[in-house]
Image (cartoon, rainbow, N blue to C red):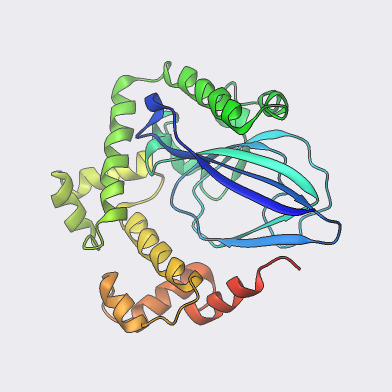
Amino acid sequence: MRHVDFRRHRSPEPLVGLVEWFWSVRWDLRIGFVHRQQVLSHPAVNISLGNPPPPGEDPPPGPYAERCVVNGVTTELTTRTLYASGWNLAARTTVGGFGAWVDDVASCNERALPGHQVLPGLDDDLAVRAASLSNDQIVDLLGQRLLTLLEKRPPARIAQARDVAQIASAVEHDRSVTVVADLARLAGVSTRTLQRSFLSCAGLSPTAVIRRYRLVEAAELVRDGAPVDWAEVAARLGYSDQSHLTRDFTATLGQSPARYAAAVRAAVEH
């Protein structure tokens, strides 16, 4: 059998605005087969249950125990490698949404932390319990645990996280937003207030969030495999010229758009 099943699940209604969605992957690959995927993540936090290998092109051989992990905001290109069999289900927060649960989101940036080190009750026993459940049941289990933790948080902090998430959503969907001043005007707050709120709840500056969304969009165009007019893309994404986009893309992903496209094509099962 050679099978990788990715799915997306709706967030429970009380978590909408803080959790974008839940996602799951289950895989069962024949011996010798590997599934690799390069990921340019959205600037969000993933709260994960399962037994996946750690990130990287050649992780140590498993099997891996079920565990609960908080994957902080990642600003670099990462490679996910799957082999043998396993499962993973995670809640992907909105940008800024994780600030409803913690006071210092940036402390988790670029890190994969044991869940219990970040939030009480997110321990490996939760993942062990989830291993025998269906995806829908795991969504209910993890969602209820997150709601229970949320009940202990200050309402003002939860409201701030929701506000940041709503503003960040405007960045994602409005391509005309390319600088912080545009976003501050759209949000009706000062640039300084916007900076503080984003750093506190999203773990990144508004500038970093804007840049990441524009790069994600560019990377998605590359992954489509069709010929790309990079000068037109640069103008549409708000870059001053094509070379600026290429420099930004290369600085973040470690390779030019052309090399990234080649790497994406090569990162398949073999």
Picture layout, residue 72 above or below residue 55 = above
Residue at image point 67% right, 54% down: 55
Q: Quadrant of the C terminus?
A: bottom right
Is 212 in front, or is 154? 212
Picture layout, residue 270 above or below residue 97 = below
Residue at image point 29% right, 81% down: 241
Identify the image quadrant of residue 19.
Answer: top left
Identify the image quadrant of residue 121.
Answer: top right
Residue at image point 65% right, 74% down: 266
Is 195 in front, or is 169? 169
**Residue, far front:** 1
Is 138 in front, or is 76? 138
Residue 41 % position (x, y): 49, 55
Residue 28 % position (x, y): 76, 49
**Residue, far right:** 31
Q: Is residue 1 left or right of residue 133?
A: right
Q: Is residue 171 left or right of residue 113?
A: left
Residue 122 % position (x, y): 60, 26
Residue 215 % position (x, y): 40, 66
Residue at image point 15% right, 50% down: 186
